Image (cartoon, rainbow, N blue to C red):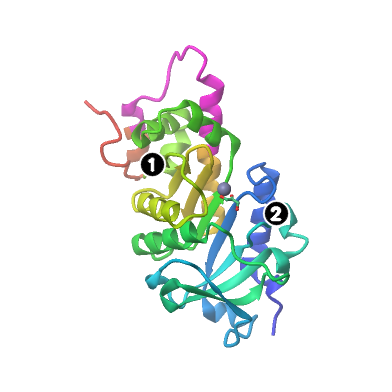
Amino acid sequence: METILDAPFMVELIRTTTNMYDHGWDERNGGNISLLVDEEELARYLDVSHPLRSIPTGFDAPTLDGRCFLVTGTGKYFKNVQYDPENNLGVIRVTDSGRTAELLWGYADGGSFTSELPAHLMSHAVRLAENPANRVIMHCHPANLLAMTFVHDLDERAFTRTLWQMCTECMIVFPDGIGVLPWMLCGTNEIGEATAEKMRRSRLVVWGQHGIYGAGADLDETFGLIETAEKAAEIYLKIAQMPILQTITDDELREIADWFHVTPREGYLDLA
Ligand code: 2HA
Ligand code: ZN
């Protein structure tokens, strides 16, 4: 049997956690990732018929029964994943209408999945219903987006429009906009449900005074989504205190959308 440490999905996830740490998005134990992996693929590396232990999740996710995820561990540091994947990561299979996670590999020191598993699995369920190719939910604490939640209106139309106006790329990368939640206690089923509800409409969800969630078909796409929004937030913070002499107009945003064949979130552009 091949070692799971050489599996392409494992190599990619380890590289991604390291890259996110290097971007300053995941201080200490900040941030978490879950990646959907097919059981048939896992069976090349693991005996999937013998779970190591079962861990209760504390919530329901009936549509995910039988699905397997590679998930970062609770209390673990992204900085350390590359040096010790087996303690910092785990592979779980969701069973029992989502109430139980069977551990197939990892969390070797007796650990468990991220405290944000409710937000991850509830968001996976919603995104899979929208796009069966969705595989990744990613959470992190990028400084500029976080800072923006202190000084910008949290209305999600206004927040989205500001980001779209900061860089031409934004309309192309997230035409579906960005959902925004006010500050809420993290790690709870409530914030999980609220995040998943926002994920119906947009693949990015900001948590006020905390961080951001992104969803995508693979790790690169999801990282790029967050990276693009974070770049726009950085530009916003650089210019917010200066007189604005020109911006990207709504007609120009429409022009970008038409040229790149993307559909802006309905009602978010003011067009004559
Ligand atoms: O796991 O980022 O939101 C640490 C966090 C909690
Ligand atoms: Zn967080």
The circle drawn on residue 77 is 2
Q: What residue span does the magenta drawing correspond to?
A: 230-253
Label 2: element kind: loop
Q: Tally the marks.
A: 2
Q: Residue furthest bottom?
A: 49
Task: Where is residue 244? Give x, y as percent.
Answer: 46, 15
Residue type at mark 2 is Tyr
Question: Who's the residue at 56% across and 22% down the image?
Answer: 238
> Badge 1 is on which residue?
177
Q: Left or right: where does residue 197 sit relative to residue 73?
A: left
Residue 34 can be seen, yes or no = yes
Q: Earlier in the sequence, mark 1 or mark 2?
A: 2
Q: Quadrant of residue 47?
A: bottom right
SS under mark 1: loop
Q: Quadrant of the C terminus?
A: top left
Q: Amino acid at mark 1?
A: Gly
- The x, y position of residue 59, in whole percent, is 44, 66
Position above or below: 45 against 114: below
Was residue 248 drawn as part of the magenta stretch in this picture? yes
Q: Nearer the viewer, residue 106 or 59?
A: 59
Question: In the picture shown, does residue 68 fall above or below 159?
Answer: below
Foreground residue among 130 and 115? 115
Residue 217 seen in render: no
Q: Distance between the Cα atoms at labels 1 and 2?
A: 30 Å
